[in-house]
Image: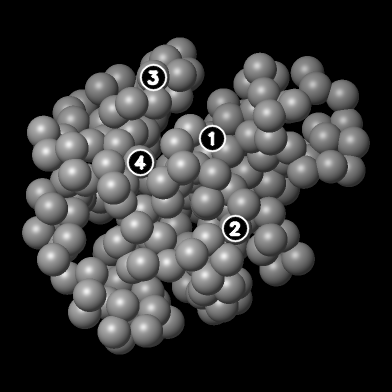
Amino acid sequence: MIPDLVIRKATFQDIDFIIKTIIEAEKSFTNIISYCGIFSLTEEELISLLEKILSENVTGQELCYSDYLVAVIGGEYAGACGAWVEGANGFSSAVLKADILFGFIPQKKILNAKHYFPTLQHLNIEREKDTLQIVYAYVIEKFRGKGLVGKLINEHIRIQKGLFPQIKKVQLRPTITNESAFKAYNKLGFELAYEKSTEDVKVLEYLPARGKYLMEKTLL
């Protein structure tokens, strides 16, 4: 029990904190943000881009503020986490995300990034239809150690199982170098399904790690 803890759905007014959540989760305890590395963006440019994208509120993919839950303690932001049921709106999250990114990122930057796409495709872990997808879990440093990520994930599960009783599995994808996240998710009942990685250390110039784990948990 955490006194004064409120977990609620994010609103438009929470966009700045959702952007912070996305950026800090992307870094995964490094200084690398994949969006910046791939598309040659400064962090300031990325923030401006995410403000526009999140304002569109395209559900069913990770760049949508209303697919996030926010944890607030004593009126102060403590953490956030995104989730959706893959394909519930009739479209894959990959297609939705690509459409919105390519609609806002300058064409020249997209063309310049194309040489990264084969490696990114190799490292991609496809999202399984009709599964609950957990993304970008982040907790402010002073509120860590209180089990907030678990509470956010469990609340996502409760909400989505109420809307989609048929879902039987929840999945997430920590980077292979984020051992603390792996252990934390394992304690929450997530098991390693497989990993995708590369031995090419050059990817660390534009990605925070050489790959990701797929972890999943069966829902009753």
Q: Earlier in the sequence, mark 2 or mark 1?
A: 2
Residue in view at x 62 percent, y 52 percent: 20
Q: Could you classify mark 1 by the number of other residues whose Cα lies within 10 Å: few (under 14), some (14-19), or many (20 or more)? A: many
Q: How is the image coloured?
A: one colour
Residue in view at x 73 percent, y 37 percent: 78
Residue at which label 3 appears: 179
Q: Is residue 12 visible?
A: yes
Amino acid on which the number 3 mark rests in the picture? Glu
Q: Earlier in the sequence, mark 4 or mark 2?
A: 2
Q: CA distance from mark 3 to mark 2?
A: 24 Å
Residue at which label 4 appears: 208
Amino acid on which the number 4 mark rests in the picture? Pro
**Camera-nearest label, 4 or 1:** 4
Tag 2 secondary structure = helix
Residue 4 at x, y percent in the picture: 88, 31
Q: CA distance from mark 4 to mark 2?
A: 18 Å
Q: CA distance from mark 3 to mark 1?
A: 18 Å
Amino acid on which the number 1 mark rests in the picture? Ile
Above or below for 96 versus 75: below
Amino acid on which the number 2 mark rests in the picture? Ile
Tag 1 secondary structure = helix
Q: Could you classify mark 2 by the number of other residues whose Cα lies within 10 Å: few (under 14), some (14-19), or many (20 or more)? A: many
Residue at which label 2 appears: 19
Residue in view at x 46 percent, y 42 percent: 31
Q: CA distance from mark 4 to mark 3?
A: 13 Å
